[in-house]
Image (cartoon, rainbow, N blue to C red):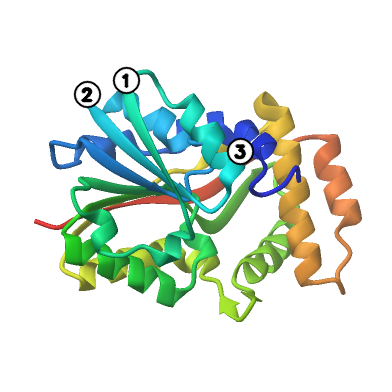
Amino acid sequence: MTGEFSADWLALREPADADARSLELVGLLPQPVKVIRDLGCGTGSLGRWLAPRLPAPQLWILTDRDHELLEVAADRMPEGANVAIDERDVTALTRDDLTGADLVTCSALLDLLTAAEVDRLVEVCAQARTTALFTLSVTGQVRFTPQDPRDREVEAAFNAHQRRETGGRPLLGPDAPAYTAAAFTRAGARVVTRESPWRLGPQRARLTAEWLRGWVGAAAQQRPDLRFDEYLAARLAALPEVTVGHRDVLAIFE
């Protein structure tokens, strides 16, 4: 894969992200939405998708620990969206950081957090009574057409890799969307979730191939005792239609 957080990979996946996110949840956002804090913003693809769907004026506070990605995001936000950047680790967010914010957003972030980090993020949102829209969290479910007998074996290894412990941090991986929704419910929010799957296949050949290499590569790292080379080669030789499960989570404090 080009790199999980590289600008090239984020650009490659942006059209699939845009098609997948739930427009229904955007329609449920309490108004007004004028100040938005985007966590782990990357190159700003969520802002480019959401800003045109919200009334002006808007202030986007782009939050990421990667300075180069922050600069790209700030430069590429839609015209009319005012921008501030905040270079930091999103797990260090505090209630004071949400003062004046109408909405907290993120995209493809929750699976990279631990349960404790999600609990802290939910607590901060609850303290500030700030609506949260967290999009494109992986669910671990992948469906292929045509199927291959090894699909489920690779899926299980990949999901185990997503739940790995790294730097002493046990990641939530595909458990993240359900865990986050439950945490917001416990905190008193009204929670609405919608499925937001990627639709891949020959029509998105480059993205599908890159995703397959990354998906199988992570599975192979988790299960080096298994050999997935022939499986990957066969999948790349005839790209299948693929549905990659994601879920969007909206939490409203009423």
Crowd tier of the residue under label 1, counting other residues whose Cα lies within 10 Å: few below 14, some 14–19, many 20 or above: few
In the displayed structure, does residue 58 sit left or right of residue 83? Answer: left
Q: Which mark is residue 56?
A: 2
| Disc marking residue 232 | none
The tag on residue 10 is 3
* Relative horizontal placement of residue 3, taking residue 101 as reference (left or right): right
Q: Are marks 1 and 2 in contact (CB under 8 Å)?
A: yes
In which quadrant of the rendered view does residue 251 lie?
Answer: bottom left
x and y, in percent, of residue 185 in the image: 22, 67
**Residue visible at 25% across and 46% down in the picture:** 103
The amino acid sitting under disc 2 is Ala
**Residue at 41% across, 38% down:** 21
- Residue at the extreme left: 254
First in sequence: mark 2 vs mark 3: 3
Mark 1 and mark 2: Cα distance apart in space: 7 Å
Label number found at residue 80:
1
The residue nearer to you, when weighing 174 against 40, is 40
Label 3 residue SS? helix
What amino acid type is highlighted by mark number 1? Gly
Residue 65 in sight from this viewpoint? yes
Circle 3: residue type? Leu
For the C terminus, the quadrant is: bottom left
Give residue 88's position: percent from left, percent from top. Answer: 48, 56
Q: Nearer the viewer, mark 1 or mark 3?
A: 1
Q: Position of residue 3 (x, y in %)?
A: 72, 47
Seen from the viewer's position, the closer of residues 51 and 190 is: 51
Count of marks placed on residues:
3
